[in-house]
Structures are given as C-alpha cells and as structure tokens.
Image (cartoon, helix red, strand yellow):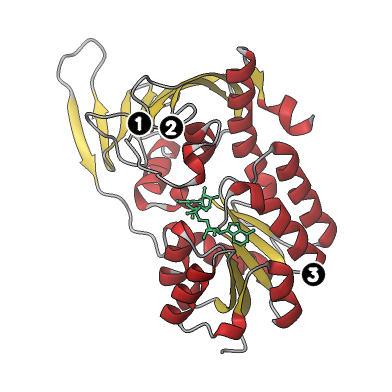
Amino acid sequence: MSTDKLRLIQCGVGGHGYGWVQHQTSQSPDFDLVAIVDVVDEQLTKVGEEVGIPAERRFKNLEDALKHVEADAILTVTPPVIHAQHAHVAFEHGLHVMTEKPIADTLDNAKRMVEMAEQSGKQLVVSQNYRFSPTVQTLKQLLNDQTVGEFGHGHMDFYIPADFTGSFRETMEFPLLVDMSIHHLDMIRCVTGRNITKVTAQSFRPPWSWYQHDPGLKMLLELEGGIPFSYSGDWSALGRYTSWNGNWRLQCGAGSLHMENDKLLVARCEKWSKDLTVEEVESTPLERGGPAATLHAFAEAIRTGQPAETSGADNLHSFGAVMAGVTSARENRTVEVAELISG
Ligand SMILES: NC(=O)c1ccc[n+]([C@@H]2O[C@H](COP(=O)([O-])OP(=O)(O)OC[C@H]3O[C@@H](n4cnc5c(N)ncnc54)[C@H](O)[C@@H]3O)[C@@H](O)[C@H]2O)c1
C-alpha cells in the first residue's frame, strides 16, 4: 500500500458498489481500499477474492471494520436508509464520508449528516456523478456562453423501462423521483447555475407498471430568477427510450439548446424565418468523468479542507428539491424548497 494515498473503507459492495470496487476504489490514484463492508457474506467473498482484499479486511459492519483497520475515509454504496447510520459512525471516528446519491432517506437525516460533518470538521461529499459527463458539462458551457442568447425556460424528458427486480426500488415509495430524478434535478442546477426554488409534482403509477409505487412523474419547477422548467418521466415506459441523462430543451432568446440521446444540438432561426439551422456540437472531453471525478473531488476536499462541488451542504439544494417534490405530490400543492431546507 502506498503511504501518500488516503485509506478508504467501502461499505456496500453489491449492485452498484461492485462496479465502484472494480472500476474505481480498487484502482484509485488517490485512495487505497483498505477494507470492504457488506451484510452479505457472498458479496464480501466474491469482491474480496476478485480485487485482493484478504478475509481479515472484509467485515459485516462498519463498527467492526473500524476496530480492526485504520482509515481516513469511507464510501457508502448502500441503500439510502443506511447512509446516515454510516456517516454517523464514520464522523464519530474522525473519518471523512462520501455517500452515493440520494444523500439519505429523509431530509432530516440529510441535514443531520451535514451538521455532523460541520461539527466534526470532516468532508461530506455526495457522488452526483451524472453532472460530471462531457455532454452535461458542454451543455452547461453552451448555456453559460449564451450561445443562442439569454436562457428563458427549459424542459426535460426521461423515459426508461428499468428492471430493478429484487432491489429496494421495487418497493420504495417514490422510486423515480427519489432514486433517479435526484440526478436530473442536480444536473439542472449544475447546467443552469440556478437553484430550484419551487416544485409542483404529480407522481403516479401507470397501470402496466411493475413497481409497487409510483415510477411516473410530471413536475413543474421554478428556478432562481423565476425561470420555469418542466420535467416528465416514467421508469416503466415502454416504447422510445431517452438516455439516462434525459432529453433536454433549453429555450433561449435566439434559439434552443438540446441534449438528445447524449448528442448536443444548437438550433437557430431568425425571427419569423422558417430557415432553421441545427448544428451538432462535439462534447469537450473531461480529464475525469462520472464516479472517477467525484472520487477525485472527495480526495481533493480532504487534502485541501475545501468543500467539494457536490458537498453535503450543496446537495441539500438538490435533495431538498426532490423532497419538495415528494411533499408536493403527497399534499397536492406547490412547495418552496427553502421552506424544507431551512425548516
Ligand atoms: N450514482 C449512480 O449512478 C448510482 C447507480 C446505482 C445506484 N446508486 C446508489 O447506490 C446506492 C446502492 O444502490 P445499489 O443499486 O447498489 O443497491 P443494492 O441493493 O444492489 O446493493 C446495496 C448493497 O449494500 C449492502 N448493504 C445493505 N445494508 C448494508 C449495511 N448496513 N452495511 C453494509 N452493506 C450493506 C447490500 O448487501 C448490497 O450488497 C443507492 O443509494 C443508489 O441510489 C447510484
């Protein structure tokens, strides 16, 4: 193990956690993976054997791992209901925390995690990896540069029939809104540089859906500056699919910006003219994208003491918008995000 690397314990090496170990944490230039934790023995054995974590560094719970292994940080890739528990244990032991999205199962737990990070003087980072894709970052740049003028309003569609047989998503109350739209709302904040201030949401379960609760969503957002942004999605939609990033239209004063099936399009048309020009724009490559970017940002936050772009405190604005959607859908009213974050 290298001495200048930070020491990381990864909790949850199942579905998505398996990919984290294989592609990121076992080969990170910033971290040494010093232990793995999972409640399922078979996962521990499989992952441990595959990436060379010996049996004495595989644990059934985080407390046990911390008794036997020295570490600087944890990453938790467990169901959202576990994130706050892991953060609590890690902060009490003086460790930094990175968690998968959504930051927690409830806004109270998310706020408690942010408070614990502040009180312990440790970093809390949420892996909102979707915002670190070349397409999303280039769309942000095109909007920021006013490529087709001033931004006025936006829309995005997300339609993917996702099979989560056996996963917590089958039975959770708002699977699309809480587990997936969190990425999209976070991306909307990232691309527009504006927080979401108000949410009006209708959540529903199409008759053919295989989820116990609602995979369908119609949502109207208001962004800072009074910008309207609509969102439509269904995680049980058969037919034409969008990409996981969704299909976007950002309407600006002199044309529109689009992300469609991960292609970027700039559409221009003179006022009253029928001569539309549509130009495809190549995305600018990133040094690091996706989870590699969030993991590196976590290491940088630990080394510099400066919060990461997707810190826990920042993430309250994304998760707060999601939970405003939950409240709106439940109570059939428009909800101010600030009312929830500061409440
Ligand atoms: N950012 C992304 O693109 C992305 C993609 C998929 C999942 N996720 C997120 O990752 C997290 C995990 O999702 P998943 O799909 O891997 O779920 P999963 O249910 O497939 O896997 C969760 C793993 O955590 C383990 N686990 C459960 N309780 C535990 C505990 N107390 N301690 C240690 N391990 C425990 C389970 O045994 C399992 O191996 C969720 O928050 C999810 O939203 C993010």
Residue 206 falls left or right of residue 274: right
Instruction: Give the total number of marks visible in the rendering.
Output: 3
Q: Could you tell which of marks 2 and 3 lies nearer the N-terminus?
A: 3
| The one of 171 and 20 positioned closer to us in this rendering | 171
**Closer mark to the observer between disc 1 and disc 3:** 1
Where 103 sits versus 50, above or below?
above
| Residue that label 3 marks | 93
Residue 305 falls left or right of residue 80: right
Residue 208 x/y as whole percent: 33, 24
Q: Which disc number belongs to residue 205? A: none
- Residue 73 visible in the displayed image: yes
Query: Three-letter amino acid code at disc 2?
Result: Tyr
Which residue is the extreme one toward the top? Answer: 272
Q: Could you tell which of marks 1 and 2 lies nearer the N-terminus?
A: 2
| Residue that label 2 marks | 211
Where 53 sits versus 119, above or below?
below
Task: Give the Cα distance between marks 1 and 2.
Answer: 8 Å
Residue 272 x/y as whole percent: 23, 10
- Asked whether the residues under the numbered discs 1 and 2 touch, taking CB atoms below 8 Å apart as contact, a structural biologist would say yes
Would you say the beta carbon of the disc 2 residue lies within 8 angstroms of ligand 1? no
Query: Three-letter amino acid code at disc 3?
Result: His
**Residue located 53% across and 22% down the image:** 221
**Closer mark to the observer between disc 1 and disc 2:** 2
Query: Three-letter amino acid code at disc 1?
Result: Ser
Check disc 1 and report its element: helix, strand or loop.
loop
Residue 319 falls left or right of residue 155: right
| Residue that label 1 marks | 236
Badge 3: how crowded within 10 Å, few (<14), some, or many (20+)? some
- Residue 5 visible in the displayed image: no
**Residue located 20% across and 36% down the image:** 279
